[in-house]
């Protein structure tokens, strides 16, 4: 690829006083790409940030930062139309339901927020997710036209609705408002 770009020519057209255009060809040379370079100081700096997670392979390569352990994460259960009545409407504590779809990018942004809130408010609030593609009847019954949509239910009634991917604080304030009542 580098040898191909070394000999690219560019045609320039300019006018001469006699009003006739004469093309002029001049070669243009591009710098050769030799890959990315990592300085020792930037590698040392990165390694010091994650020193407690450093691993060494047999070949001598290093993983500077490993992924976080996600086994302790609380996964919010998915509901279907058939479980709706018993799990949400007949619940003795408030319920937050996230209506989502697998193709929805903002839904993927809000999933970890709902998972963390489920962990924080365990026992005080129930959390469920419902896939609108698999359970469209429930979504239609509550007028869900956009995903993600979060609806809070208390005593079997829809009490609040939040449409779109919102910050954690917005959902947390909504939950806390229903815990006080």
Image (tube, grey):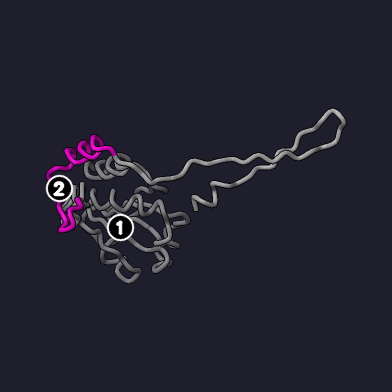
Quadrant holding the C terminus? top left
Instruction: Kindly identify the residue that appears in the image at 20 percent across and 52 percent down.
Output: 61
The quarter of the picture where residue 14 lies is top right
Between residues 80 and 17, which one lies in front from this camera angle?
17
Residue contact at pointers 1 and 2, CB within 8 angstroms:
no
Is 57 left or right of 162, judged from the image as shown? left
Q: Position of residue 173 (x, y in %)?
A: 28, 40
Instruction: Kindly identify the residue that appears in the image at 33 percent across and 68 percent down.
Output: 80
Marking on residue 53: 2
Segment tinted magenta in the rendering: 39-62
Is 3 left or right of 45, judged from the image as shown? right
Look at the image and say whether residue 102 sits in the magenta stretch.
no
Instruction: Kindly identify the residue that appears in the image at 85 percent across and 36 percent down.
Output: 20
Is 26 left or right of 168, judged from the image as shown? right
Instruction: Kindly identify the residue that appears in the image at 23 percent across and 40 percent down.
Output: 43
**Vertical placement of residue 22 versus 142, above or below:** above
Between residues 57 and 78, which one lies in front from this camera angle?
57
Marking on residue 156: 1
Q: Position of residue 79 (x, y in %)?
A: 30, 65
Q: Dot 1, crowdedness within 10 Å: few (<14), some or many (≥20)?
A: some
Q: Dot 2, crowdedness within 10 Å: few (<14), some or many (≥20)?
A: some
Q: Position of residue 110 (x, y in %)?
A: 34, 50
Between residues 135 and 152, which one lies in front from this camera angle?
135
Helix, strand or loop status at disc 1? loop
The quarter of the picture where residue 44 lies is top left
């Amino acid at each position: 690829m580098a040898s191909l770009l070394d000999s690219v020519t560019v045609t320039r057209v300019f006018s001469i006083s006699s009003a006739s255009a004469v093309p002029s060809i001049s070669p243009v040379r591009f710098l050769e790409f030799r890959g990315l370079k990592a300085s020792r100081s930037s590698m040392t700096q990165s390694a010091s940030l994650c020193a407690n997670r450093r691993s060494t392979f047999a070949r001598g390569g290093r993983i500077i930062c490993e992924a976080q352990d996600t086994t302790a994460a609380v996964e919010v259960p998915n509901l279907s139309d058939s479980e709706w009545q018993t799990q949400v409407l007949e619940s003795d504590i408030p319920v937050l339901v996230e209506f989502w779809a697998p193709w929805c990018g903002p839904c993927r942004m809000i999933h970890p927020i709902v998972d963390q809130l489920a962990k924080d408010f365990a026992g005080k609030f129930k959390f469920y997710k419902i896939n609108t593609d698999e359970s469209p009847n429930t979504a239609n019954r509550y007028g869900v036209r956009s995903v993600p949509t979060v609806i809070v239910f208390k005593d079997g009634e829809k009490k609040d609705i939040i449409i779109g991917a919102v910050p954690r604080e917005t959902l947390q304030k909504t939950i806390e408002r229903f815990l006080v009542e």
